Image (tube, rainbow, N blue to C red):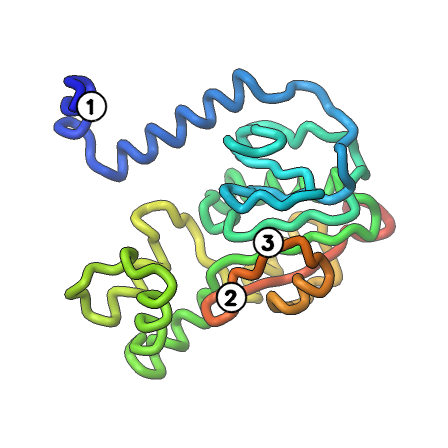
Amino acid sequence: MPPLRRLGRYVFSDWTRRAIKFDLLRLRAKLRGPRRYRKPSSPLMHLGSGSNYVKGWVNVDVAGADVNIDLTARPLPFFDNCFEAVVSQHLIEHLDLETETFALLRESLRVLKPGGELWLSTPDLAKICRHYLEDGAHALSEYVRHRDPLSLPADAPERFVVNTLFFQRGYHRNLFDFELLSWALTRGGFGDIQRVDEKDLSERFPAFPPRNDDYEVLMVRCRKPVGGMR
């Protein structure tokens, strides 16, 4: 192992090293990312695309996307009213609600056409709590172990899965239920907020591969008011 890496492991915790790595990605996106508004190549934006690249959409993230940008610190580099739909899966739980989420929602509203759709999915606070109260998170733990066997310690009690979904090793900043997410979206200027599921997303946008995570996830669809930003 190189000396600097050994020193980093000695000085910094795992969480701090992950945070530094992510902040360096954000810095690179700030320095290299687009600085002027542009017309997108598609009227469909996949926001926070990560490794889930969707063909035919403008994939936007901090790295590895069509457009790399620090989502939490700069405006989206697109003209007003240029997208028909924005889909964002498992992004908002990683953002600070007051300093980052509201700003990104307002930017999403700005780039959507009047009547345009925003689809969001995020871990469902209500579902996780309900699973815990119903059977001590037994079924939820089995579900997570089946989906991602390495996400839980082999000898962890079943209740440990609640910590995993709440905090995800420090990556999660907020969890939402429908009422809390509706409040955030309303404050961001959106209306016609409806609870949906993955089947609705797949029927509306077949290009998105299924995640099969309705068991733990809240998904909503909302719209930019036809009258414009509020």
Q: Quadrant of residue 37?
A: top right
Judging depth in this view, the residue of 62 and 129 nearest the camera is 62
Q: Report the mark closest to the observer, 3 or 2.
A: 2
Q: Mark 3 or 2 closer to N-term?
A: 3
- Which sits earlier in the primary sequence, circle 1 or circle 2? 1
Quarter of the image holding residue 53?
A: top right
- Label 1 secondary element: helix
Q: CA distance from mark 3 to mark 1?
A: 40 Å
x then y, percent, for residue 22: 39, 32
**Which residue occupies 51% across, 42% down?**
50
- Label 3 close to label 2 by CB (< 8 Å): no
Label at residue 5: 1
At 73% from the left and 30% from the top, the residue drawn is 78
Circle 1/circle 2 CB separation < 8 Å: no
Helix, strand or loop at label 2? It is loop
Q: Amino acid at mark 2?
A: Asn
Along the line of sight, the residue nearer the viewer: 56 or 174:
56
Identify the residue at image location x=64%, y=21%: 34
Residue bearing mark 3: 184
Compared across the picture, whether 168 is left or right of 229 comes to: left
Residue at image point 46% right, 43% down: 96
- Front disc: 3 or 1: 1
Of the numbered discs 3 and 1, the one sitting upstream in the chain is 1
The image shows residue 9 at horizontal and vertical percentages of: 17, 29
Q: Residues within 10 Å of mark 3 (few under 14, many from 20)?
A: some
Q: Quadrant of residue 137?
A: bottom left
The residue pinned by badge 2 equals 212
Q: What amino acid type is highlighted by mark number 3? A: Ala
Q: Judge left or right: residue 228 versus residue 71.
A: right
